[in-house]
Amino acid sequence: MRKNTIDIITLGCSKNLVDSERLIRQLELNGYRVTHDSANPQGEIVVVNTCGFIADAQEESVNMILELCQAKEEGRVKQVYVMGCLSQRFMKELGHEIPQVDKFYGKFDWKDLLTDLGKVYQQDRQYERRLTTPKHYAYLKISEGCDRHCAYCAIPLITGRHQSRPIEDIVAEVEHLVDEGVKEFQLIAQELTYYGLDLYGEQKIAELVERISDVKGVKWIRLHYAYPTNFPWDLLRVIRERKNVCKYLDIALQHISTKVLTNMQRHVDKEETYELIRRIRQEVPGIAIRTTLMVGFPGEGETEFEELKEFVRWARFDRMGAFAYSEEEGTPAQKNFKDEVPDKVKQRRLSELMDLQQGISAEVQAEKVGKVLRVIIDRKEGEYYVGRTEFDSPEVDPEVLIPVVDGVLRRGNFYDVQIVDSDDFDLYGKIKRE
């Protein structure tokens, strides 16, 4: 057990990761040594930042807490603290079921941990984070909460109403991170396109992206978690015109059947969704669209599932993820619908959908062979340097592999790479020489 050392374990999404990075830096400013996601936590204190989005994530979080409580009972850890979404949602229940935890915090009161440790949150250092990503890119959280209230989603129950950060606050953080060496920013929120409505009375995501784009040293901006209803069309102009805004949009569509979308409370229908994709591609030629789809939601029969597959064939998404519906306590879907699709059918549909997308992805990637693409290098792995194009977000998207024998490449630098081969997901390239 290492004295004056704290281990932080982050579960769930990149929004949680940003909170952990801020906590880590504040702990460091107060004299602690901090490790992140250690395979073998050895600090006196362990803090678990939990996820509570779906059942599998909740189970993972609970299992991690129990494992650390066992370590505490065995004397390998002195104190265990829990924060994040699961704790926010089920604090009383968790406190009753797992009393070995020293204290539970929600998603927004983690600063109280510093007070409980006898330390002080340093407000004048609020923009500082200890990045857990490679130092050339960072996630940038622009808002909290969500006002959309999709029937299946527990996020509004956890995070509450949508709260945008002021533009000036976000730009100041970007300027600080650029000074620290960050070149690439992944803009994240539970719902990106709603940004600004609560603060300014209108959607301000386009203006925000322009302001960030103006910051000297920002090389790439990538947009995550847009919403199809009331899409802010002026954002497409910004993506098209600004050279450091990646031609990339992550927009979760969930389904295409009007029946299923209505049950989901998505406030959009089949025809509007088709038109949305058409217009995005018309206004931003060459844009990469990433989406997430759901199978097995109440009301999805074989007819609706076939509609979904036909949509995927038509849309030819550059990137696509999918998951099976799971009933979440307290959501409108749990209250109003019976979870009628058997798990076996859900898994079969999920496999069919992902198999379909795998073939599409292989074709999309093959179309890039012979092209020269701008690539940022993330790491060296075995016999390859591994990088990404503007069409690829970290962690979730395909990568570009460049043989080490092609020359010495620096992590965080950009190179022109000629694509020479592809597989179902990744690309293979060589440095383009003058």
Image: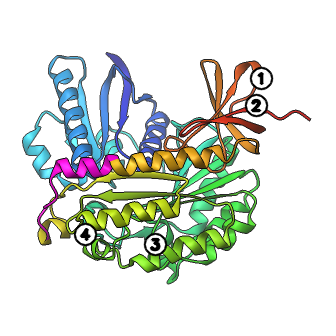
Residue holding disc 4:
151
Left or right: residue 94 compared with residue 188: left
- Tag 1 or tag 3, which sits nearer the N-term? 3
Q: How far apart are marks 2 and 4 (CA)?
A: 47 Å
The range drawn in magenta is: 337-351
Q: How crowded is mark 2: few (under 14 residues within 10 Å), some or many (20 or more)?
A: many
Task: Please state the horizontal and vertical placement of residue 35, each as a whole percent of the image.
Answer: 43, 27
Residue holding disc 2:
430
Q: Nearer the viewer, mark 4 or mark 1?
A: 1
Residue holding disc 3:
228
Q: Residues within 10 Å of mark 3 (few under 14, many from 20)?
A: some
Residue holding disc 1:
406
Q: SS at mark 4?
A: loop
Task: Please state the horizontal and vertical placement of residue 120, each as a whole percent of the image.
Answer: 41, 44
Q: Is residue 49 above or below residue 168?
A: above
Q: The residue under label 1 is which amino acid type? A: Asp
Tell me, yes or no, whether the highlighted magenta stretch contains residue 345.
yes
Q: Residues within 10 Å of mark 1 (few under 14, many from 20)?
A: few
